[in-house]
Amino acid sequence: MNDTPRVCVQVQSAYIESQSAPEEERYVFAYAVTIRNVGRIAVQLIGRYWLITNGNGRETEVQGEGVVGEQPHIEPGGEYQYTSGAVLETPIGTMQGHYQMIDADSENFRVEIPVFRLAIATHIH
């Protein structure tokens, strides 16, 4: 029996025009994350790390405990969803990072979050 934790992460991003001010170089994006436990043991998300890169290559690192004030437990076959946001000085950028997790056997592991795009639809190339 393989008890290795298996966690999948999906992200969808959207430009929030109503909160943005392009004339002030303020572009607001929301991103919705779904974290699925496709393994056979329970896991808990205990920390996060994001690398946010704007269209000019400027990088910002964000790290901390949990996500949106929570450190969710995710049972086998279960999922956790949350929405958060990022503010860029450019109409296009990227995010990537990882979640620090712990399984039911108190083993720490990391789940990579592949790069995803933050962009106004008219600026996607």
Image (spheres, rainbow, N blue to C red):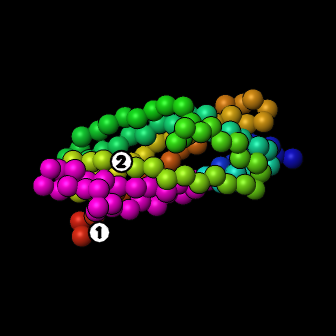
Residue labelled with disc 2: 86
Q: Residue furthest right?
A: 1
Q: Position of residue 43 (x, y in %)?
A: 71, 41
Q: Secondary structure at mark 2?
A: strand
In front: 30, or 1? 30
Residue drawn at point x = 37 percent, y = 34 percent: 61
Residue sticking out furthest to the left: 23
Number of other residues with Cα within 10 Å of mark 2, as a class: few under 14, some 14 to 19, many 20 or more: some
**Quarter of the image where one finds residue 58:** top left
Magenta stretch: includes residue 17:
yes
- The residue sitting at the front extreme is 18
Q: Identify residue type, mark 1.
A: Ala
Give the alpha-carbon distance from disc 2 to disc 1, as whole Å.
Answer: 16 Å
Residue 92 % position (x, y): 26, 56
Q: Amino acid at mark 2?
A: Ala
Q: Quadrant of residue 3?
A: top right
With respect to residue 111, does 36 lie above or below?
Answer: below
The magenta-colored residue range is 8-34
Q: Position of residue 5 (x, y in %)?
A: 72, 44
Q: Which of these two is toward me, 8 or 31?
A: 31
Q: Is residue 15 magenta?
A: yes
Q: Looking at the image, which residue is at 23% across and 65% down?
A: 123
- Labels 2 and 1: the sequence-earlier one: 2
User: Which quadrant does the C terminus fall into?
Assistant: bottom left
Residue picked out by circle 1: 121
Query: Label 1: how many residues lie within 10 Å, few (<14), some (14-19) or many (20+)?
Result: few
